[in-house]
Image (tube, rainbow, N blue to C red):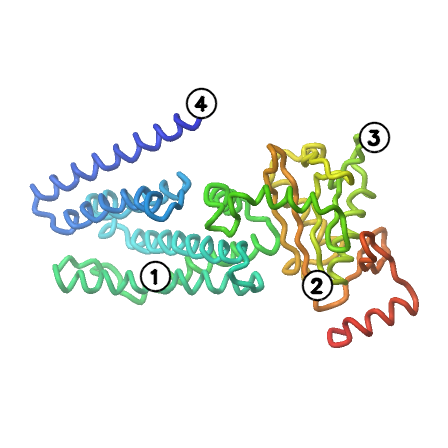
Amino acid sequence: MKKEPKKSSARIVIVNLMRGLLVLAFFGALFNDRKLILFISVLAFAITFLPQIIRKYLSIDIPAQFEAMIILFIYGTLLFGEAHGFYSEFWWYGALINLASAAALGAFGFVVMYALHKGDKIRGSPLLIAFLSFCFAVAIGTMWQFFEYFVDIAFGFGLHRVGNVMDDLIMSIIGAFTVSTAGYFYIKNGRVIIISRLIEKLIERNPKLFGKNADSAQGIIDLIGKGESANLEFKSTLRTNLHTNQIDKKIEQSALKTITAYLNSDGGTLLVGVSDKGEILGTDNDSFETKDRLNLHFTNLIKQHIGAEYLPFIKFELANVDGKHVLKVDCTKSNKYVFLKCDKEEDFYIRNGPSNARLTGNALIDYIGNNFNKAA
C-alpha cells in the first residue's frame, strides 16, 4: 500500500518536469521566432494532459509505460528533431520517428482490438485481430500525414521538407505491420513478453474496458457454488500432485483431458485452483514465478498435446478470487474432432455428465460421424 503513492508521485514529478521543459521550449521558440517549434511545443503540452483527461472522463487508467512512450515521442520530435536539427542532418531520423510512431499506433490499435476480443465483443482468429489492429494503425498514420500536409499549407512549416508523404506512409506501414505481427503471435502463442506485460497491466487497471466486470471474482464464486457438472469442472492444481508436492505429468494430463472433452462436446469451463469440494486453493501450489510463466506454460501444453490450431476455441485468464489466483478456462465446441496426444498415443475424450469418457473403436467412429461429419 505504501509503494503506490511513491509511483504516483514519481509520475507527477516526471510529467511536470516535461511540461516545464516544454514551456521553456515555447518561450525559446517565441524569442527566436521559430514557428514550428512554437506550434509543436503547444501541441505537445496539450498532449501531456491527454492521459489525465482519458483517466478522468473515460475511466481508463493508462499504465506509466504508455505515458513514457508519449514523452519519448514528444522529445524525439521536438527537441532532437527540430531544435537540434536532426531532421536536416540525418536522413534516417525522420524515418525512425515515423517508424516509432507507427509502432506505437499499432500497439494502441492492437490493445483496442484485443480488449474487444477478450471481452467477447468481437470473435475472430488471431490473424483477424492482428489485421484489424494493422488497419487501425495505418488509417491513423494516414490521417496524421494529411494533418501535417494541411498544417504546412496553412502555416508554411515545411514538415515534409525532408522526404515525402509516400516515404512516411511506407514507414508507417512497416511499423504497423511489425507490431501487428507481434500481436498475432502474442494471441496465438503467448510469447511476446513485453506486449503481454503491458496488456496485463492495462487489463488489471481497466477490468470494465476488457469486458471483465468488477464482480468477475463473484462470478467465479457463483460458478463454484453450482458445483461440478457436464460443463463445469474443478482442478486443485495444474501440474502439482498435492500428495507428493511434486510436479506430476498425470495432473497436467487430467486437465488436458477435460479441455479435450469440452472441445469434442458442447464446451464448458475448467477452474484450476479449486478443489473438488469447491475450496479456493489458488495456483500458488504450482510454483510459477509469474502469471506470465503460468500462461505461457499452459499455452505450450495446449500446443503440444492438443494443437495450436485449437487455441481460438480456448480462452483462459487468471482471476483474483479472495486474494488467490484461479485459472479460468472457457472452451467452445471445436469445428473438428480433437485428439489428446500423450506418451506417443492419441486418445479421444468426450463429456459424460460431470466426468470425461474415452471413446475407442466403433463408438469413436460413430461419434465423429454424427458430430463432425462436415469437418471430417
**Residue 350: x, y in percent?**
81, 60
The reply to whether dot 3 and dot 4 touch (C-beta < 8 Å) is no
Under mark 2, the amino acid is: Lys
Q: Which mark is residue 244?
A: 3
Dot 2 falls on a residue whose secondary structure is loop
**Which residue is drawn at the image coordinates 55% and 48% (left, top)?**
192
Q: Residue furthest right?
A: 361
Q: Residue furthest bottom?
A: 374
The reply to whether dot 3 and dot 1 touch (C-beta < 8 Å) is no
Q: Is residue 120 left or right of residue 293?
A: left
Under mark 1, the amino acid is: Ile
Under mark 3, the amino acid is: Thr
Q: Say which of marks 3 and 2 sits in front.
A: 2
Q: Say which of marks 1 and 4 sits in front.
A: 4
Q: Nearer the viewer, residue 9 or 35?
A: 9
**Separation (CA) of disc 4 from disc 2:** 46 Å
**Separation (CA) of disc 3 from disc 1:** 56 Å
**Which residue is drawn at the image coordinates 85% and 58% (left, top)?**
347
Q: Say which of marks 3 and 1 sits in front.
A: 3
Displayed quadrant of residue 251: top right
Q: Which mark is residue 2?
A: 4
- What residue sits right under mark 1 in the picture? 140
**Residue 59: x, y in percent?**
38, 45
Under mark 4, the amino acid is: Lys
Dot 4 falls on a residue whose secondary structure is loop
- What residue sits right under mark 2 in the picture? 333
